[in-house]
Amino acid sequence: LLLSVVMTWLALNRAGLRAAVLPGLAGLILMLEVWHFSGVSLTRTAIPDRALRVLTQNVGMDSPAALAAWLARNPTDLVLLQEVYRVQWDQWQKLAGTLGYHLLYRELRRDSGMGELILSRLPLTPLPPVSGPSRGPRLRYFTRARITYRDRPVEVLSVHLESLPIIGGRRRFFGASRFRLHQAQLLVDALSRIQLPIILGGDLNATPVYRS
């Protein structure tokens, strides 16, 4: 943010740096947009007593024990997790058993070694996943299930849209947007056919200004 402000100020005040005004303003707008859409902490928001408490988080290689400690202090009915690695599966099963969660796991891609995990205090009925194209000859799967909340069926989806991939040990910064947009459209089409309340959470790798 500071760099964007400095670039914009220099471009506006020094004739030789006029070309820097556009990248400076672009960086400033991007930073302000990210700040504007940042989430609000649940600890600062009053939650009705009968509300269904939902958490969504990309956990990566974070320790399941850390999340277990948080969930023990903050009772949560439905937990939608992304980047749950297969090598930690025993720890996630232990978390579910200790805290009384039903669980449903699905691989993100067959070659990814990670996937999406739904933890629910209410019984889970697995449903066929929504799938879409990803890089290479692979499909990307979005986990889908059904719960019953206050005598009403509710469909639940945990999704992880296309991100900037690492190919050959290097991060690629271009090419993911078309996959992400296609995946988002497939999700919209699938949701439009569901005649039930829907809870969708996940890592969208996008903000509200992205087309996806």
Image: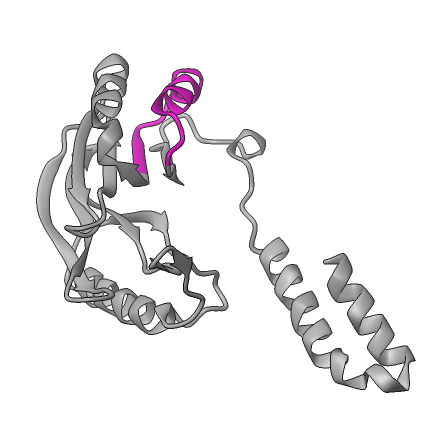
* 19 lies left or right of 75: right
- How many numbered discs, if any? 0
Q: Quadrant of residue 188?
A: bottom left
Q: For residue 29: magenta?
A: no
> Where in the figure is residue 138, as x and y percent of width and height?
16, 61
Magenta highlight range? 61-80
> Where in the figure is residue 39, as x and y percent of width and height?
53, 46
Q: Quadrant of the N terminus?
A: bottom right
Which of 208/178 is in front? 178
* 110 lies left or right of 91: left
Q: Quadrant of the C terminus?
A: bottom left
* Residue displayed at 44% across by 21% down: 70
The answer to whether residue 125 is above or below residue 17 is: above
Residue 198 makes an appearance in the image: yes
Q: Quadrant of residue 44?
A: top right
Residue 153 makes an appearance in the image: no
* Residue displayed at 39% across by 25% down: 67
The answer to whether residue 81 is above or below residue 28 is: above
Q: For residue 69: magenta?
A: yes
* Residue displayed at 32% across by 70% down: 181
> Where in the figure is residue 41, as x and y percent of width and height?
55, 36
The answer to whether residue 85 is above or below residue 160 is: above
* Residue displayed at 63% across by 54% down: 35
Residue extending farthest to the top is 98
Q: Quadrant of residue 32?
A: bottom right
Rendered image coloring scheme: one colour
* 175 lies left or right of 187: right
Which of 137/25 is in front? 137
> Where in the figure is residue 85, as x and y percent of width and height?
27, 36
